[in-house]
Amino acid sequence: MRPLGTSVAALVLAATAASTSAATSAERHHDPRPHDTRPATPTLAARAVLPADTFVPGSEPSGSFTGNPAAPFPGQPVQGFSGVHRLPGGDYLAMSDNGYGAKANSQDFQLRVHRIRPHTDTGTIEVRGGFTLSDPDRLVPFATWRDGGCQAAAAAGTLPAGYTCPTRDRQLTGWDFDIESMQLAPDGTIWFGEEFGPFLLHTDGRGRLLEAPLPTPGVKSPSNPTLAPGEQPNLANSKGFEGMAISPDGGRLHAMLEGPVAGDPATDLRVYDVRVGDHTADHRRPTRFTGAYDVYRLESPTNAIGDHIAVDKHRFLTIERDNGSGPTAAFKRIYLVDDRDRDHDGRLDKTLLVDLLDVADPDGVGGLGDPFTFPYVTIEDVELIDDDTIAVLNDNNYPGTGGRGAGVKDVTEYLEIDLPQPLRADHRLLVGE
């Protein structure tokens, strides 16, 4: 199992203890299956739903900068899951992204990691708490919204009517960073990949920044706050680190861009090799980009990736999707990816694992017909449950609509999919091993 460290472990202690209770016994328990009980194709095993209008209790209103006539919303939406991590006992850490999709409309969305529990017996998702990212030690070298940015906008007269700046603090928002991927390190700290820089962020188990944002060498997006006058960005907005895997030993990050760097083929995405540093008093070795990267080739230049996680030291699960939603969705797939380049074409090898628009559901688990389809525009979460089963979740882009019907608000759906063949994953990446 992935070590949690004391900070993260404290968040889930009660949930882990509760997993031994009778209440949990009604939910689906996963054990390695003998060959004769495996499904012939990827099969839906469980589904649970979080309603779209779910907000963090007691939180600040949000959405004031979106232009949505329904805004401001009554709190911080529990939405936009773009990275998940399974915990002992069946809880998950689920990371929201920057909020409403851009730097210019997410100033009042607080960057947050939620603790959730899918109840597959009832088909519901319980929100059990979480934490907000912050920079108490002032490691971010540029202004943040809640400590300088808002005050500058107020002085310029650009705040929307009715909005007032929050009390200065070091909580981080979707104006500061667009976090899109998350991995827990063996020491209990957390790594986030984001898209404005793109940067890598390193926090403790409560989301407090431990070091300055780590920039990507030679790559900047138009939203990068360090762009010099006249400097040209070479990565499109919202095309940063959408996926990020961590090696079984925790020593490497495989940080994957969602879009091509200028000059690269339009179908080719870089997966950077990052060596995780040692910040103990005895070593003080910094985290660094090695300068090397692998190449993932999209099936179409209009596709994007949604997540990228490790199965072992060489293999990964990668979500690749089109931009369609509902009836226009045509490509939503999970690939098993291998970095050993067995065909010697200079790119990662890909094998289709699951077509998310064609998941067998002979028992009617999803309640939406057989085959079950997952036609959301952004499917951004995949996680290992055991050697035979994966979890998949969508980013619902609150208050987006269209995945399950025109004008219908997109909910967050949690799926468990049984695989026809075991992944033979590294045991260190399987919770409970």
Image: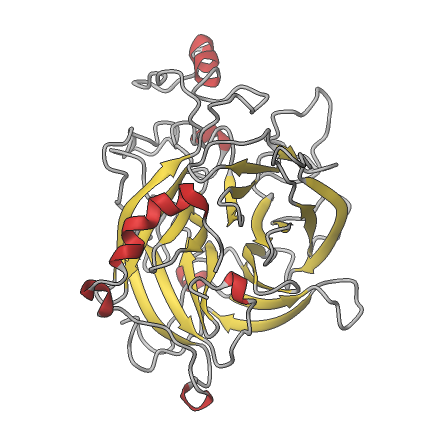
**Quadrant assignment, res 7:** top left
Coloring scheme used: secondary structure
Residue 79 in sight from this viewpoint: no
In the image as oriented, which residue stretches furthest toward the top?
155
Closest to the observer, 69 or 265: 265
Q: Is residue 47 left or right of residue 42?
A: left
Task: Residue 362 in the image: state x and y as whole percent.
Answer: 33, 82
Q: Is residue 264 left or right of residue 173?
A: right
Closest to the observer, 232 or 342: 342
Query: Eyeballing the image, is 261 above or below 212?
Result: below
What is the count of numbered marks?
Answer: 0
The residue depicted at 38 percent of the width and 68 percent of the height is 416
Q: Is residue 371 left or right of residue 18?
A: right
In the image as oriented, which residue stretches furthest toward the front?
282
Query: Eyeballing the image, is 304 above or below 75?
Result: below
Task: Residue 344 in the image: state x and y as whole percent.
Answer: 80, 69
The residue depicted at 45 percent of the width and 42 percent of the height is 97
Query: Eyeballing the image, is 294 above or below 70?
Result: below
Task: Residue 46 in the image: state x and y as whole percent.
Answer: 32, 70
Q: Is residue 19 left or right of residue 338?
A: left
Task: Residue 129 in the image: state x and y as whole percent.
Answer: 30, 43
Residue 97 in sight from this viewpoint: yes
In the image as oriented, which residue stretches furthest toward the left?
22
The residue depicted at 33 percent of the width and 16 percent of the height is 164
